[in-house]
Image (spheres, rainbow, N blue to C red):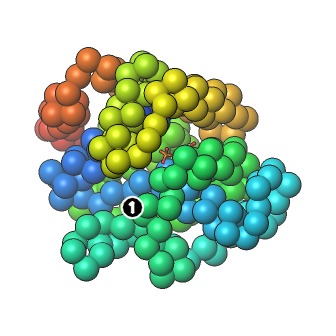
Amino acid sequence: MTAPVPIITIDGPSGSGKGTIADQLAQTLGWHLLDSGALYRLLALAAQQRGITEPEQHRAELAKLAVSLPIEFRPDSSGNSKAWLDGVDVSGAIRQPQISGLASRVAAIPEVRTGLLQRQRGFLRLPGLVADGRDMGTVVFTEAPLKIFLTASAEERAKRRYKQLKAKGESVNIARLYREIEERDRRDRNRKVAPLRPAANAIVIDSTEMSIQKVLDEILSLHYKLDLSL
Ligand code: DC
């Protein structure tokens, strides 16, 4: 029998710090990383490129795309990790606000979620996987021994997003960001399939008042404790 591949799942709403934490955790442990939100974003971008503005009316087509879409995660020539669609670096394009909204609608389609399931599980490889998303602990990797649910208040998450976008030189309105975050949260929490919620055995960490380093240290200490007890 082969040894099971260790997994840490990190779920939570947008702006909770999941992406940064998952990335740093994977680097610290030397494990693979699955940014499952990027898969939904890539699919949303592919839909937009095909002129689809109402994803709910193109369920079968999107489900097919979910299985067959030519996507890759690999570094560019400077060594920075990037997302590629059809051989084109779309890392910037998939972070546009319009794609965020479309991704959340695409992600609410059950056939799309089923289509992406095996793809996500394909990321599971030794020496281990850090999986970042909304349903990593509840649906995709239910067997994970360590499940984290990372939250922060909506105000704090809007502030973080505001700072990120400002640093990139984008003109942003914090009230609008807050509204968009609330709208996306509402859709992600209330959808019928795989709604955003902590797994029964998840450890909930509220990062509103915590630095990234503090969250990371807490997860690492949970991981090492669990590792010792196995
Ligand atoms: O984490 P993110 O903001 O990049 O995710 C983009 C959208 O995809 C978000 O609205 C929620 C959705 N998503 C999902 O439904 N399930 C996941 N495992 C990851 C993301």
The residue nearer to you, when weighing 29 against 19, is: 19
Q: Within the image, what quadrant is residue 125 found in?
A: bottom left
Q: Is residue 50 above or below residue 23?
A: below
Q: Position of residue 61 (x, y in %)?
A: 78, 67
Q: Is residue 125 above or below residue 77?
A: above
Q: Is residue 41 visible?
A: yes
Ligand 1 within 8 angstroms of badge 1 C-beta: no
Residue at horizontal 29%, vertical 60%? 32
Q: Is residue 83 left or right of residue 81?
A: right
Q: Is residue 152 left or right of residue 194?
A: left
Quadrant location of the N terminus? bottom left
Q: Within the image, what quadrant is residue 201 found in?
A: top left
Residue carrying label 1: 124
Q: Position of residue 214 (x, y in %)?
A: 16, 28
Q: Is residue 50 above or below residue 24?
A: below
The residue nearer to you, when weighing 48 against 28, is: 48
Q: In the image, what residue type sits under mark 1?
A: Leu
